[in-house]
Image (tube, grey):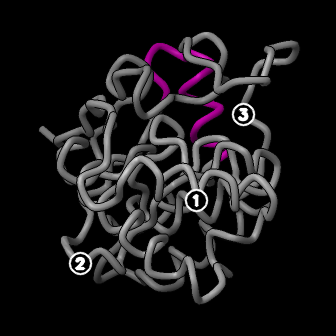
Amino acid sequence: MMVVRQKAVLLTALAQLSPAEHNQLRGQGAQNSKFWTEADDENKQLVSRFKDEVKGHYYLHQGRRCCYCSKELDPHKGSYDAEHILDQSTYPRFMFELNNLAAACKSCNGGKSTKHILVVGVDDAAIPTQSEHYTIVHPHLDEWADFLCFDLVGRIKPTDGRSKGAETISICRIEKLNMARLADHFLGAGFKDAEKALKSFTRK
């Protein structure tokens, strides 16, 4: 049986930054949607310490698994991302909010990118805090196994066809991982050609 990620316990306070330093980052992020990666010299070390603590916390509390695909994450922090659940480009004011962050593999984070994940009509003046506010499986509000499961070859499938599971697969482009896992079963029988054909099929 394949292990799935756990619903993360929220990080509610930082040990590596003071409340004043955290608020400083909040203010800078709200003014500049690229501040996460392009902080000035004065704030670069604060951002680095913030990322380090957030990634370490959610890595452990998600059971070392990606918040979206449940793939086991390598312990090296450079191998996975601090994921903004509501993306930082659209919602820079939430860039440094602890309940808007999780640990995700680079594939899921890149696939999700800036796609819209809130249910139409949900008030986003503050970070929505109910599961039903989101179209995808939420790292902190949803148990992964309530919406997604593995089939016999390790592909990720919606549980009982529930829409959140299917939307998560689509938004995070998890079908690419599914095709690779299916292709694994062609090892020794044209594996590379099978994987190429399956990925091409998925794109189309």
- Give the magenta-colored segment's residue range: 158-171
Q: Which amino acid does label 2 sit on?
A: His
**In the foreground, 196 or 72:** 72
Farthest front residue? 20
Q: What residue type is labelled 1?
A: Leu
* Number of the label disc, if any, that sits on residue 76: 2
Q: Which amino acid does label 3 sit on?
A: Ile
Residue at the (40%, 63%) spot, across then down: 50
Q: Measuring from the top left, give residue 174's x and y in whole percent.
A: 54, 52
73 versus 58 height, above or below? below
First in sequence: mark 3 vs mark 2? 2
First in sequence: mark 1 vs mark 3? 1
**Residue 14 drawn in magenta:** no
Which quadrant of the figure contains the C terminus? bottom right
Which residue is labeled 3 in the image?
Answer: 117
Direction from residue 77 to residue 93 in the image, left or right: right
Per the model, the C-alpha gap separating discs 1 and 3 is 24 Å
Q: Which of marks 1 and 2 is in front?
A: 1
Residue at the (75%, 71%) spot, across then down: 34
